Image (spheres, grey):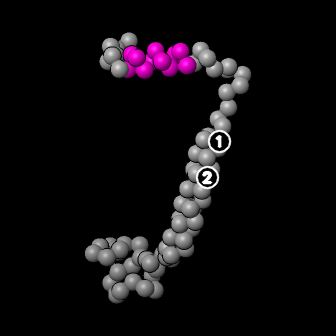
Amino acid sequence: MPDMTPSANLAMMHAAEFAKELDKNKVTPGVLGFLVFAGLAVGVWFLMKSMTRHMNRVNFENPGTAADAPAGESAETGPGTSAKTA
């Protein structure tokens, strides 16, 4: 076990004493646990709402269709390459 600083050692001793006083059958998250969980849930809700709004703005159409390609290019070969024919 690594050496602890004196303040960390003192904190661990106080935590151990406090843990002895708690009844392990009666410990609950309490109001603070509920508020943290509720805050995380609200945050996830806002993130999902924002993601949905951004996903609705994305254009998912494929720009590489053969009808839209300039002369001399095809959708399969792409710009700057040439298709070799035998």
For residue 7, what is the image quadrant?
Answer: top left
Whether 11 is drawn above or below 39: the answer is above
- Magenta stretch bounds: 8-18
- What residue is shown with label 1? 31
Dominant secondary-structure state across the stretch colored magenta: helix
Question: Mark 2: which amino acid?
Answer: Ala
The percent coordinates of residue 83 (x first, y second) are 34, 74
Whether 62 is drawn above or below 50: the answer is below
Question: 47 or 68: nearer the eye?
Answer: 47
- What residue is shown with label 2? 41
Decide if residue 40 is in sight here: yes
Q: Is residue 33 left or right of residue 7?
A: right
The extreme left residue here reads 80
Residue drawn at (58%, 65%), measured in percent from left and top?
49
Residue drawn at (62%, 50%), measured in percent from left and top?
38
Query: Please, what secondary structure does the residue beneath circle 1 have?
Result: helix
Whether 37 is drawn above or below 16: the answer is below
Magenta stretch contains residue 20: no
Question: Mark 1: which amino acid?
Answer: Val
Residue drawn at (58%, 51%), measured in percent from left and top?
39
Q: Nearer the viewer, mark 2 or mark 1?
A: 1
The percent coordinates of residue 51 (x first, y second) are 53, 65
All told, the count of numbered labels is 2
Magenta stretch contains residue 9: yes
